[in-house]
Amino acid sequence: MDKRDAILNATKTLLAERGFYGISMKLIADTAGIAAGTIYRYFENKETLISELYRHITREVAQTTFKGWSDQLSLEEKYKLLWRNTFDAVREDPQRLAVIEMLFLQPRLAREEAAFCDNEAFYPLMDFYQQGIDQGVFHDWQIHALITLSFDTAITLAKKIIRKRFTPDEMQINQVRDASWLIIQKS
C-alpha cells in the first residue's frame, strides 16, 4: 500500500471511530505509520484530505457495487447483482458505510460531490434505472426515489445483521431483495 492510500485508510478508520472532531493530522499520520509532514505532500490540508477521502470511498463503492456487472444481464439479474453487492459490501466493511454517512452530512461535500457520484462513478446505476423506466418496467419516479426503495433495504438489513438484531438465513435475505425488486416495478 502506498503512503497516499495509507493516509486515506487511516483517515477512514479514525473517522469511523472518532468522528470529525476526534481526529488531527498528527493522529492520522501516526495511524498511517508516517511522519505528520508527509500528509502535506499528498493533501494540502484536512479539508482537501476529507474531500479526497469522499472521492476515494465513492470509487471503492462503485467498484464493489458493479462487481460482476454485464450489460448482457437482464434488468432483474442486474438488480439482484447490485442489491447483493451492496448488501455484502456493508456487511464486509461497516466502517466504510459509517464514514460515507458522516461525509454525506457535510453540506459542502454533499453539494460538491453529489454530481461526481451521479455522473461518473455511478453512471451505470443511473442508466440501469432509466432503462427500467424507459422500458415501462419501473415506476416513472425520480431515480433517487427508486434507489432508496432498492438499496436502503440492502443497507438496513446488513446493518441489522451487523448489530446482531436479526439473523436471517439466505432465503430470508433473498425474500427482502425480491420484495424490494417488486416495489419498484410498475405492474
Image (cartoon, rainbow, N blue to C red):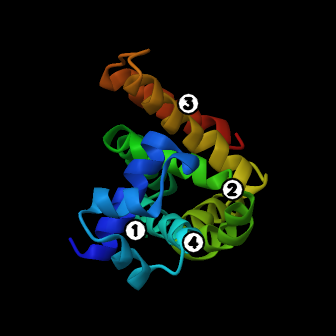
Question: What residue is drawn where x is 37% and y is 47%?
Answer: 89
- Where residue 57 sits, quadrant-wise, is bottom left
Quote the CA–CA distance across marks 3 and 2: 32 Å
Q: How many neighbours does mark 1 have within 10 angstroms: few (below 14), some (14-19), or many (20 or more)?
A: few
Q: How many neighbours does mark 3 have within 10 angstroms: few (below 14), some (14-19), or many (20 or more)?
A: few
The kind of residue on which mark 4 rests is Tyr
Q: Which mark is residue 94?
A: none
Q: Is residue 11 left or right of residue 122?
A: left
Quote the CA–CA distance across marks 3 and 1: 23 Å
Quadrant where the image shows the N terminus: bottom left
Q: How many neighbours does mark 2 have within 10 angstroms: few (below 14), some (14-19), or many (20 or more)?
A: few
Q: Is residue 7 left or right of residue 40?
A: left
Do labels 3 and 1 touch, CB within 8 Å?
no
Q: Of 3 and 65, which appears nearest the observer?
A: 3
- In the image, farthest residue toward the left: 1
The kind of residue on which mark 1 rests is Gln
**Which mark sits nearer the N-terminus, 3 or 1?**
1
Label 3, secondary structure: give it.
Answer: helix
Question: What residue is drawn where x is 48% and y is 52%?
Answer: 23
Residue at the disc numbered 3: 179
Label 1, secondary structure: give it.
Answer: loop
Question: What residue is drawn where x is 65% and y is 69%?
Answer: 113
**Which mark sits nearer the N-terminus, 4 or 3?**
4
* Residue 27 percent across, percent down from the top left: 38, 56
**Which mark sits nearer the N-terminus, 2 or 4?**
2
- Where residue 114 sits, quadrant-wise, is bottom right
